[in-house]
Image (cartoon, rainbow, N blue to C red):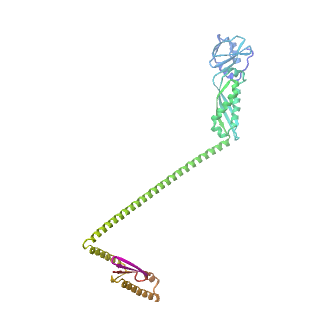
Amino acid sequence: MAGVVRSGALSMALRIGARTRPQTGLFPQTSLTHLARHASGLPMNTVILFVPQQEAWVVERMGRYHRILEPGFNLLIPILDRIKYVQSLKEIVIDIPEQSAITIDNVTLQIDGVLYLRILDPYKASYGVEDPEYAVTQLAQTTMRSEIGKITMDQVFKEREVLNVAIVDAINLAADAWGMRCLRYEIRDIQMPDRVKEAMVMQVEAERKKRAAILESEGLREAEINVAEGKKKARILASEAVRMEETNRAEGEANAITLRAKARAESLQVVSEVIGKQYGSQAASLNVAEQYVQAFSHLAKTGNTLVLPSNTGDVSSMVAQAMAIYGNLNQHNQKQLEAPDTTTTEEKKEDSPMKDVVLYIVVKDTFMCISLPYSKQLDVFVFYY
């Protein structure tokens, strides 16, 4: 048992479990050899050994590496062979203690994590590094600080998965020489300074207020758009209704005009046919006379209209008579203008205004109109022939 060498914290943890392991030798061990096994922490060379599954026992012969015992039955030469290292091939979980790291925007963070690794080459794990667990722990801490220093604080929270992958890749580059493989690294907890926490809380509140304001403004915009579209559609419908109404009215008027024109044409056709018959001209004269009488009845309703009968064969005498009446009226008006004005303002307002005189001369079925200067008493002369 002389010359036993210490194999490190990782092997020590595996050896602690070996204390409760069942007897592996062919013959029962004495209390002395059992105490010797516990003192060294390694299995003793009992010639016949049974290696457990997922373990690799490194054997040295006369102080030099000899071979690695596979799981199951194995034979060793007493005194010459001894078990130097015991490596576990299972996945190992290592707790990475909390440490400080500074981001690229100068924020100090306290970060801890969990590392998962496995030994792939027991020879390199035994002879490549003194204490594999300690070496991997230190490598994980330094790598984590290096990767944190490349990103901002916001990216630490947003890109945690990317950060974990970067740490695993960096660890595997160095751990390959130690016969180990890092399977994954997980950041467990991130602690920030109190002032940074307060700033983050304020930022979150501001972001929520911003989103609320945006949602409210979008709601108002949608409401205004809906109202505007409603008004637009209402105006379009109203304009279409007005257009249809005007179209219908115009079509109605056009139809009415067409019907009146057709009726007039038919009446003229009937009149022309009647005139060509016996006593047709007398009937037409009677119709014209009735229309004249009706026209005079309308003219008689106005108080400023004078109807003067005259000889139908002497138009010049009728015009002379009309001009004489107009001259007399004009002289009478001139005298009234030269006389002193004793009327009040209200009487002037009630007085009839100056009007032009219009002569209407009716000859047979023809009307003649003559406009004369203003007169105060009469504005229309109608001569009927």
x then y, percent, for residue 129: 72, 24
Q: Quadrant of the N terminus?
A: top right
x then y, percent, for residue 282: 27, 75
Image vertical order of residue 167 relative to residue 283, above or below: above
**Residue 370 within the magenta-colored segment of the rendering:** yes
Image vertical order of residue 322 relative to residue 221, above or below: below
Name the residue located 70 percent from the left edge and 22 percent from the top edge: 124
Q: Quadrant of the C terminus?
A: bottom left
For this rendering, which residue is in front, 250 or 270? 270
Residue 350 shows in the view: no
Name the residue located 36 percent from the left edge and 77 percent from the top edge: 367
Residue 139 shows in the view: yes
For this rendering, which residue is in front, 19 or 222? 222
x then y, percent, for residue 190: 65, 36
Image vertical order of residue 240 relative to residue 282, above or below: above
Magenta-drawn segment:
357-372
Q: Main secondary structure of the magenta part?
A: strand
Q: Quadrant of residue 114?
A: top right
Name the residue located 34 percent from the left edge and 66 percent from the top edge: 261
Q: As drawn, is 345 to the left or to the right of 364?
A: right
Q: As drawn, is 353 to the left or to the right of 197?
A: left
- Residue with the most extreme front position: 276
- Residue with the most extreme left position: 278
Q: How many marks?
A: 0
Q: As drawn, is 196 to the left or to the right of 319?
A: right
For this rendering, which residue is in front, 281 or 83? 281
Q: Quadrant of residue 119?
A: top right
x then y, percent, for residue 317: 36, 85
For this rendering, which residue is in front, 176 or 195? 176
**Residue 190 within the magenta-colored segment of the rendering:** no
Q: As drawn, is 43 to the left or to the right of 332?
A: right
